[in-house]
Image: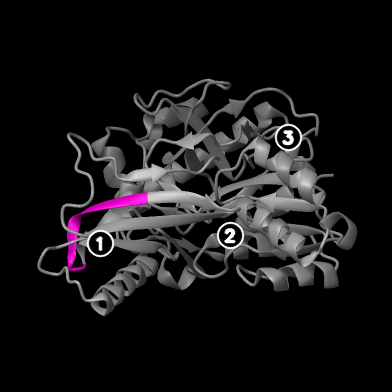
């Protein structure tokens, strides 16, 4: 079953020709009308006339998250403010977040990509989809919501939290599919068991669209064996638009809408473009994005392009399951968290010293983060109520900047370990 068979089953050479036309148009427009891209191309001694085939994309400079930070909030935008119809915001590596803007057409391309993805896993008008990703500044909830509505499904915008109520809604409304993080789905299963609810017997839930955090084939197997649902991987980042691409029914790689996004895999150390089947860092170019075009953006996720034919009949490019990252980003309950972001926040609090440790564990199915913080000698006191207030203030500041709640443990001056050379401040005890 296809949503747009003309594109999804387009001969590969025709798709490459289409991608080249879109790339050429994009580069010409940005060189001519956008100062950031014009200056960046000039600095790298490249001109639109140098782009004469799709492979010439390698002549263009990379973009990184630092470019987004340096141009926060809207200096990267390429349309006037009155054409922006939505903003989304994600965590950044300092106190400043990443801001993404969308035009009406951007939202339509995003929704189109999701409609293709949801159709490829059999989601349609007969389904009721419970969206248990976060809504609001995070892209997950609204992305999945509009994609499901596009294919005619009934949407239940549950958001996060209220787990027992979510289980009741799955039963009462005959929910057939759920979109959430894999760890939250496992948590739902654990709570349902305590409630005496058997997903196989007591619900119609049969499909799960899972993403926003790393998960393994063993977790997929655990979910399917314990809950009786078929689990599908979904991929996306806020810089692209949000969650966009899924596996198909074959579940052998994530299909990418090649007319919307062009994917390269590079050696993260040299920047050399790698061949299909070689694992490296994913680089994306958004071919049709209007408000905030991205050319050769280094996502930092590790994967590879798959060059075998998918039995589903789609000829679109496919990437393998994400196996890691080239930076130190942590994904906690679906939220991107950087150690440098934590450090930035702690340094704004006068009582906090310069030593801290980050411990990440998994309590049941949910991630837990504990941050141990040394207090400056002049701020440390034996008065319990003062320490309780300080800890609460630090936790509040971290939640404000990280967008998730974390636990803080206060330590006396000199209590935390010191390191020779590069400090090892993160201890991730999760088994992914």
Using the rendered view, name the quadrant where residue 120 is placed: top right
- Cα distance between the residues tagged 3 and 1: 52 Å
- Image mark for residue 287: none
Query: How many callouts does the rendering have?
Result: 3
Using the rendered view, name the quadrant where residue 129 is placed: bottom right
| In the displayed structure image, the side of residue 233 where residue 40 appears, left or right | left
Q: 10 Å neighbourhood of mark 2: few (<14), some, or many (≥20)?
A: many
| In the displayed structure image, the side of residue 73 where residue 145 appears, left or right | right
Mark 2 / mark 3, whichever is N-terminal: 3
Residue behind mark 2? 140
**What is the magenta segment's predominant secondary structure?**
strand
The magenta segment is: 349-358
Mark 3 / mark 1, whichever is N-terminal: 3
Residue behind mark 3? 10
The quadrant of the picture occupied by the N terminus is top right
Q: Is residue 247 visible?
A: no
Please report the residue visible at 21 percent of the width from the left and 68 percent of the height from the top: 349
- Cα distance between the residues tagged 1 and 2: 28 Å
- Cα distance between the residues tagged 2 and 3: 29 Å
Front residue of 431/68: it is: 431
Are dots 3 and 1 in contact, CB under 8 Å? no
Q: 10 Å neighbourhood of mark 3: few (<14), some, or many (≥20)?
A: some
Residue behind mark 1? 346
Q: Position of residue 47 (x, y in %)?
A: 34, 35
Are dots 1 and 2 in contact, CB under 8 Å? no
State which mark lies toward you, 3 or 1.
1
């Amino acid at each position: 079953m296809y949503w747009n068979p003309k594109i999804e089953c387009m001969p590969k050479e025709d798709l490459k020709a289409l991608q080249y036309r879109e790339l050429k148009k994009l580069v010409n427009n940005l060189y001519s009308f956008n100062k950031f891209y014009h200056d960046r191309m000039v600095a790298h001694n490249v001109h639109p006339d140098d782009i004469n085939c799709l492979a010439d994309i390698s002549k263009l400079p990379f973009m990184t998250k630092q470019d987004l930070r340096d141009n926060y909030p809207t200096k990267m935008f390429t349309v006037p403010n009155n054409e922006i119809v939505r903003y989304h915001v994600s965590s950044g590596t300092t106190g400043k977040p990443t801001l993404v803007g969308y035009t009406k057409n951007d939202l339509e391309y995003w929704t189109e990509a999701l409609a293709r993805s949801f159709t490829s896993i059999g989601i349609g008008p007969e389904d009721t989809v419970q969206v248990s990703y976060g809504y609001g500044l995070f892209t997950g909830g609204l992305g999945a919501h509009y994609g499901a509505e596009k294919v005619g499904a009934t949407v239940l915008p549950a958001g996060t939290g209220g787990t027992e109520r979510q289980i009741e809604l799955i039963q009462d409304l005959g929910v057939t599919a759920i979109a959430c993080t894999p760890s939250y789905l496992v948590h739902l299963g654990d709570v349902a068991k305590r409630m005496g609810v058997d997903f196989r017997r007591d619900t119609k839930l049969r499909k799960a669209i899972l993403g926003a955090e790393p998960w393994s084939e063993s977790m997929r197997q655990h979910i399917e064996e314990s809950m009786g649902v078929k689990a599908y991987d979904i991929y996306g980042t806020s810089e692209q638009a949000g969650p966009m691409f899924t596996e198909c029914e074959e579940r052998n790689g994530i299909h990418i809408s090649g007319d919307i996004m062009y994917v390269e895999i590079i050696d993260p150390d040299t920047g050399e473009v790698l061949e299909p089947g070689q694992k490296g860092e994913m680089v994306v170019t958004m071919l049709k994005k209007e408000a905030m075009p991205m050319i050769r953006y280094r996502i930092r996720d590790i994967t590879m392009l798959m060059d075998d034919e998918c039995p589903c009949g789609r000829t679109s490019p496919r990437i393998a399951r994400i196996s890691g990252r080239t930076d130190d980003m942590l994904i906690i309950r679906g939220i991107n968290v950087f150690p440098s972001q934590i450090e930035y926040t702690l340094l704004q609090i006068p009582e906090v010293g310069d030593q801290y440790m980050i411990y990440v564990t998994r309590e049941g199915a949910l991630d837990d983060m504990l941050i141990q913080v040394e207090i400056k000698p002049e701020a440390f006191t034996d008065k319990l109520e003062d320490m309780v207030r300080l800890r609460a203030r630090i936790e509040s500041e971290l939640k404000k900047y990280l967008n998730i709640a974390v636990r803080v443990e206060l330590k006396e001056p000199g209590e935390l370990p010191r390191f020779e050379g590069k400090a090892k401040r993160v201890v991730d005890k999760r088994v992914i």
